[in-house]
Image (cartoon, coloured by chain):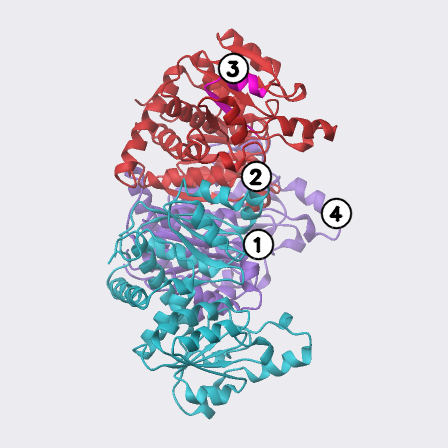
Chain colours: A cyan, B purple, C red
């Protein structure tokens, strides 16, 4: 395919519908292959550098797993070192140095735009694994892959996104990639945590339907899938408001029984109270399968960036 | 053999005599093979995750070495990240997430029973690398492998265990695995640090002879092997009591000369004062060979857990 | 060649001119090979341990990259663990333990002589990656390799070393390896940071010419190459003195235009103010190429230490 060869993966809105479909196709192919054997040595001899300036163990380990399952090697700069390296050195210099060692860089940094800045400074591909309140495009891609797999298609979907839609970079990137597929969205959040206006406007321009609400029961009854996210106490000036929201946005067995129909549940994890563990063996509870899908999608992205698919 | 295939390694008392003998046999085979070549790629494409919620560099590096010598890959979550991942997430959720990446988990966690809890939550094999004051079964297995190699047999042994026998999980797990072989034990410790009653009772039921004493010279004179452990100052309310104990449980050249016979010395390391460096080139000083044996035994366990031996 | 087989790499002055030329030759061969393929699996099955008691991310990652490009595996003890491992255990014991796992040790430790101490305690090769204010020989070797590549030869060179020449272990090791090639040196530093007397004496004995000066413009006008280093504020009792020095030892576009001839610029990195980013795309700015050369030189050293070249 070669469509992502040599490219950076920086933002949820960088992908065409065709590219998203290609990524899904390659991930799906890799998933089938890995059921038959343990690795696919397409990137033997290549080295991936993880550059994490803030901790994100699961994202780092997911990339390290993906690279190793493709036969490649890994070098890692952790958050402790990150702070010391950064001392007195520009991010650009650090990145240029690492680019002398590695063939691809995965970066997580607290500043919006940092991944783009690094991508501009080096000649090897750069993958954004989270730039502050900005983007986290590989999470969005693994989410859409999971939706595709769980529901069998990306056509005529109705999806509820629940929780902190204002600050969650995960949901921002996800709606960008979903917007190519004419989704009907329910944005379920208290007013102060609703989706930013510029995002809902853009979705509407792209022929997506959007309903904003704080009624999870209603939204769930209309949806094929619920994408839960965590609500952080720190976002609320009024703690009693937090307690109310926290209490109304919880999915447990009782909720599912009242709902009375099969629904698919995703969550970027870690969860706190939003999804009760008594739901974990419900057939629609797909959040741990979602974690595993991250490996297939990141393998697909790595292979494609090197022109190997 | 396949006897450990798919199993967890959680506790010193989980092994039958036959299983212990199989592990020793496979470790011994691997040791011989590694003298001829550098690695045995039995686990190519498999990934081991180390999940260390408290530091234990030597145990982690021993497992990482073992996995790599078997051709497998490694992903690692360190103690710093451990504390941050754990924040607001249950151990079970963390483990289930990691289980989506890896093929086997090695866990160290300060809480007794934590490894079992993780093993119950995931479908891949889990190896306990220390759960607080609980167990550390792979250390016990490498110890028994070392005893077997140094003494040539596990029959009719007389062994002195010296130091903090009350709190040492290493010695607890070791006597469990040794108990299958009818050993004569000398437990050399001050009263307040003697072996817990339930352990000595169980040993006696299993036809092991047990002598409790604080006389190291006497015990050594009767023993084939001394297993030294560290005594921690913090265990003593009365510091003068600590100083006395510390002074009487030391092995140095003078001690060995007075003893007047060859004896084998083991220690789980790190040592502090218990074994003087002037003993390091004594032919019976086996504690660094013991470290190396850890690689062979962990290779054996990993291969067996995957049904490769 | 086999000339470094089984040897330790501890000090800049340990190498003969012939050995340096061999290292350059092997590094050059590897560099060419790596342009055609991604790795050279000469050390498959070997394991390198990095033992870093103080952080040095770039040096660690450079070695880890080198080992992996040679097909070998890596185990790493980080500075956080280093401090905890070291607690109550001698450096020698830690090293002897690690030597049971790995086939080669790379150590960085704040104490002068620590790498030698470790090398004496273990039977596997040890590479000094910085021992406090002591030596950092692999940096010196990658520097000389870069000089050779950038200037095409090591004959009849005139080189300015600029900055903190008193405390910089990098420049101390570099002049040791350069001294075999009859270099004309300009040591550009304020008086209090000039090169130690015993080093300039030794250079003169070896037929090197040495000029000490604080006039960077003059020195540059006579030199083929400038080796910049960082000056640390902490070295100055009088801060106004620091500001003056800091201001006069800066290379930027204006400086280069005034100089009016091509010159090669090296820097061990990280840089702070000494080299302005507006110089980065100047054709003589070789400091990021220098970083990449570190991989070729460390690959050469590792291969040679194992007798593979």
Image point (68%, 81%), residue name: A240
Label located before the other in sequence (2 or 3): 2
Residue situated in front as seen by the camera: A82 or B215: A82
Q: Which mark is residue B239?
A: 4
Q: Chain of mark 1?
A: B
Q: Residues within 10 Å of mark 4 (few under 14, many from 20)?
A: few
Of the residues tagged 1 and 3, which is closer to the observer?
Answer: 3
Q: Chain of mark 2?
A: C
Q: Which mark is residue C232?
A: none
Image coords of residue C29 (percent x, y) = 29, 28
Residue numbers of the magenta segment: C216-229
Give the CA distance from mark 2 to mark 3: 32 Å
Quadrant the N terminus of chain B occupies: bottom left
**What kind of element bears circle 4?**
helix
Of the residues tagged 1 and 2, which is closer to the observer?
Answer: 2
Give the CA distance from mark 1 to mark 4: 20 Å
Label located before the other in sequence (1 or 4): 1
Image point (48%, 37%), residue name: C59
**What kind of element bears circle 1?**
loop
Which residue lies under the disc numbered 2? C54
Classify C71 as above or below A183: above
Classify B17 as above or below A177: above
Image point (41%, 67%), residue name: A140
Q: Which mark is residue B168?
A: 1
- Kindly check if marks 2 and 3 are in contact, taking CB atoms under 8 A apart as contact: no
**What kind of element bears circle 3?**
strand
The part of the image, by quadrant, that contains residue B304 is bottom left
Which residue lies under the disc numbered 3? C185
Q: Chain of mark 4?
A: B
- Kindly check if marks 1 and 4 are in contact, taking CB atoms under 8 A apart as contact: no
């Amino acid at each position: 395919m070669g469509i992502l060869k040599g490219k950076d993966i920086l933002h949820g809105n960088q992908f065409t519908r065709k590219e998203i479909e290609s990524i899904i196709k390659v991930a799906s192919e890799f998933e089938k292959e890995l059921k038959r054997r343990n690795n696919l040595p397409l990137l033997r001899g290549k080295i991936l550098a993880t550059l994490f300036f803030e901790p994100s163990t699961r994202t780092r380990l997911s990339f390290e797993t993906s690279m190793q399952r493709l036969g490649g090697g890994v070098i890692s700069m952790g958050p402790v070192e990150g702070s010391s390296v950064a001392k007195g050195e520009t991010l650009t210099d650090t990145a240029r140095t690492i680019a002398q060692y590695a063939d691809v860089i995965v970066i997580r940094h607290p500043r919006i735009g940092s991944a783009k800045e690094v991508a501009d400074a080096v000649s090897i591909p750069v993958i954004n694994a989270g730039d502050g309140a900005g983007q986290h495009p590989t999470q969005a891609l693994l989410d859409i892959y999971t939706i595709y797999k769980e529901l069998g298609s990306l056509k005529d979907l109705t999806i509820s996104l629940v929780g902190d839609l204002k600050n969650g970079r995960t949901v921002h990137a996800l709606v960008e990639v979903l917007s190519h597929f004419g989704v009907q969205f329910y944005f379920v959040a208290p007013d102060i945590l609703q989706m930013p206006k510029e995002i809902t406007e853009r979705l509407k321009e792209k022929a997506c339907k959007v309903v904003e609400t704080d009624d999870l029961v209603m939204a769930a009854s209309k949806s094929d899938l619920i994408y839960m996210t965590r609500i952080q106490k720190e976002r609320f000036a009024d703690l009693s408001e937090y307690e109310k929201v926290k209490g109304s946005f919880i999915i447990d067995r009782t909720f599912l029984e009242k709902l009375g129909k099969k629904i698919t549940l995703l969550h970027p994890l870690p969860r706190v109270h939003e999804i009760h563990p008594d739901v974990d063996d419900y057939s629609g509870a797909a959040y741990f399968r979602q974690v595993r899908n991250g490996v297939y999608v990141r393998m697909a992205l790595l292979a494609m960036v090197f022109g190997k698919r």
